[in-house]
């Protein structure tokens, strides 16, 4: 499997080539079984090759393309269900983030990741979207969406977004994470994920399976630091909706709400029955929020 020629300070996220192939096989098998009409192709960027999934109706000039940027340890194969929901309404693109497990490049830099990821998204949009885009970012994906200054971005929807405040990591999450990383099993992965959903919420079996594969095959990354206030202030030039779950263990509303108002000049939407995994817990709410964000984009409408 070919890799881009990275400098020495940009290591692979995979433990070895065999486990990289295992991750690719898992993703390709899920996409191969997917019953939603879609196309997958790859584009080159300075961050490495990027896997792109397109689905939904043909784009029209009046409506921006919806572009989903997944968060840490996730990708388009994991989020087929939300891609299906979005593609039922809009022309939809899902990008696998380089440096995260999936079908994109296997390397991420040790330093300067925010600028690196921002440039990557700008380049990916240039090659995959012919006009304006509503970019939807979850968790790490939200920070990437904020880091990009692409002129194609007509609106942003940030879901449980990093980049605004530092994430909390409660001791109970650490206690569940250590054994999951030390000896990954599906029950241990589910125990970690249970902290990320609302009390009594269901942990999807496939997500627990995927996170077991991730722990066995990959070196996970830490959450990004908050972006500079001046950069965040610049992002007020296009409409931005921000949402988090009432029970988000990493980004509770009491921390995120003031930062959203201070840096982005808008109000936080709180989803009462959700935790951190909004794409899994509240797909209908996400579709509603995307509809609002599309309507808020200049000159757009369904």
Image: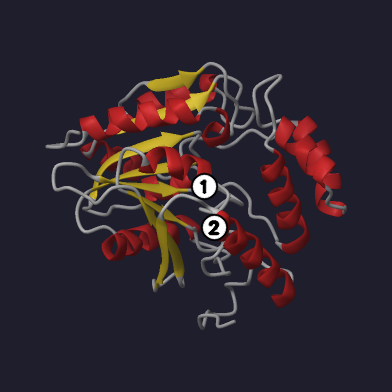
Q: Within 10 angstroms of label 1, few (less than 14), some, or many (20 or more) residues? A: some
Give residue 260's position: percent from left, percent from top. Answer: 40, 28
Picture coordinates of residue 123, whole percent (x, y): 32, 64
Which residue has dot 1 on it?
A: 80
How packed mark 2 is, by other alpha carbons closer than 10 Å (few <14, some 14-19, many 20 or more), is some
Q: Residue 37's x, y, as percent?
A: 41, 54
Q: Secondary structure at mark 1?
A: helix
**Residue at the (22%, 30%) spot, across then down:** 295
Which mark is drawn over residue 180? none
Q: Is residue 219 left or right of residue 79?
A: right
Which SS class for mark 2? helix
Circles 2, 1 touching at the beta carbon (< 8 Å): yes
Residue 139 visible in the shown view? no
Check the image and name the residue furthest to the top.
272
Residue labelled with disc 2: 31
Q: Is residue 115 above or below residue 166?
A: below
Towards the viewer: 285 or 253: 285
């Amino acid at each position: 499997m070919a890799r881009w020629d990275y400098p020495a300070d940009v290591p692979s996220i995979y433990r070895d080539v065999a486990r990289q192939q295992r991750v690719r096989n898992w993703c390709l098998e899920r996409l191969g079984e997917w019953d939603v009409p879609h196309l997958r192709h790859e584009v080159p960027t300075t961050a490495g090759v990027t896997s792109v999934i397109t689905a939904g109706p043909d784009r029209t000039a009046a409506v921006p393309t919806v572009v989903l940027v997944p968060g840490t340890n996730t990708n388009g194969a994991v989020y087929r269900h939300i891609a299906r929901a979005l593609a039922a309404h809009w022309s939809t693109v899902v990008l696998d983030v380089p440096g995260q497990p999936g079908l994109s490049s296997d390397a991420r830099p040790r330093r300067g990741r925010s600028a690196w990821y921002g440039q990557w998204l700008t380049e990916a949009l240039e090659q995959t979207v012919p006009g304006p885009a509503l970019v939807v970012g979850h968790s790490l994906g939200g920070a990437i969406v904020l880091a990009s200054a692409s002129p194609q971005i007509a609106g942003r929807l940030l879901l449980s977004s990093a980049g605004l405040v530092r994430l909390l990591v409660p001791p109970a999450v650490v206690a569940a994470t250590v054994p999951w990383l030390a000896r990954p099993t599906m029950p241990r992965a589910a125990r970690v994920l249970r902290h990320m959903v609302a009390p009594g919420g269901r942990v999807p079996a496939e997500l627990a399976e995927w996170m077991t594969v991730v722990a066995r095959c990959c070196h996970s990354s830490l959450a990004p630091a908050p972006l500079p206030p001046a950069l965040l202030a610049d992002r007020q030039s296009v409409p931005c909706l921000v949402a988090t779950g009432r029970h988000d263990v990493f980004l509770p509303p009491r921390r995120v709400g003031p930062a959203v108002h201070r840096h982005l000049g808008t109000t936080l939407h709180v989803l009462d029955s959700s935790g951190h995994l909004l794409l899994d817990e509240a797909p209908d709410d996400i579709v509603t929020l995307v509809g609002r964000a599309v309507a808020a984009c200049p000159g757009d409408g369904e």
